[in-house]
């Protein structure tokens, strides 16, 4: 499985996290992703994701003057986007914990069977 395939469901949450604290434009998001070690994401990859997130009302955009060139579209989170980011963080923490258990061969001492929790 390629890294790109693994990242498909994760990059949305990363973009929401980048946008969380301040308005950010597309190129700036690509630079931030690069600074975090995500080397395969360009503006061309990010803009379709932002467009979809805007249609889903997770982000909103505002055109602002640029010191160099045409106006830039800045993105910020909506309340719905903040809620989605919080859900993503919760799901990510749970997934990361479970994958780490598997990779480190740490069996879960509690597991669910039907409606019952079984302790080993």
Image (tube, grey):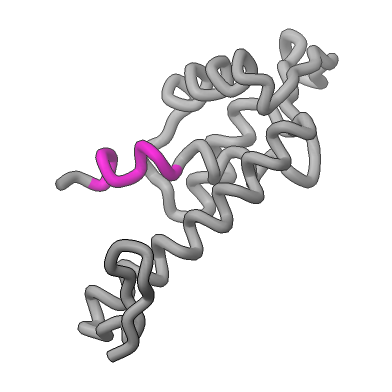
Vertical placement of 21 versus 110: above or below? above
* Residue nearer the viewer, 33 or 110: 110
Q: Pinpoint residue 28: horizontal percent, then vertical percent.
A: 63, 34
Residue 18 relative to residue 46: left or right: right
Q: In the visual, does 103 lie left or right of 56?
A: left
Q: Quadrant of the C terminus?
A: bottom left
- Compared to residue 50, the image places residue 81 above or below, namely below
Vertical order, 116 against 28 (above or below): below
| Residue 46: x %, y % from top left | 49, 26
Main structural element of the magenta stretch: helix, strand or loop? Answer: helix
Q: Which range of residues does the magenta coloring cover?
A: 3-10
Relative side of 74 to 10, left or right: right
Q: Which residue occupies 37% across, 76% down?
A: 117
Question: Which of 64/78 is in front?
Answer: 78
Q: Residue at x 73, y 8 (%)?
A: 70
From the top left corner, tell me how far across and down residue 116 is, in percent: 36, 71
Using the rendered view, name the quadrant where residue 118 is placed.
Answer: bottom left
- Name, please, the residue furthest toward the top: 70
> Which residue in the rendered view is the most extreme toward the front?
115
Q: Would you identify the image quadrant in which residue 40 lies?
A: top left
Q: Position of residue 48 (x, y in %)?
A: 48, 17
Residue at (29%, 46%) from the top-left corner?
6
Q: Nearer the viewer, residue 1 or 39?
A: 1
């Amino acid at each position: 499985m390629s890294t790109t395939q693994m990242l498909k469901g994760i990059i949305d949450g990363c973009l929401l996290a980048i946008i969380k604290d301040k308005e950010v434009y597309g190129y700036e998001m690509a630079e931030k992703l690069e600074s975090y070690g995500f080397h395969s994401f360009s503006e061309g990859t990010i803009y379709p994701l932002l467009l979809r997130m805007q249609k889903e009302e997770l982000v909103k955009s505002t055109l602002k003057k640029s010191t160099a060139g045409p106006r830039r579209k800045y993105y910020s989170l909506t309340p719905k986007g903040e809620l989605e980011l919080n859900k993503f963080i919760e799901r990510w923490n749970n997934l990361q914990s479970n994958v780490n258990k598997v990779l480190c061969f740490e069996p879960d001492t509690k597991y669910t069977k039907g409606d019952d929790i079984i302790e080993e």
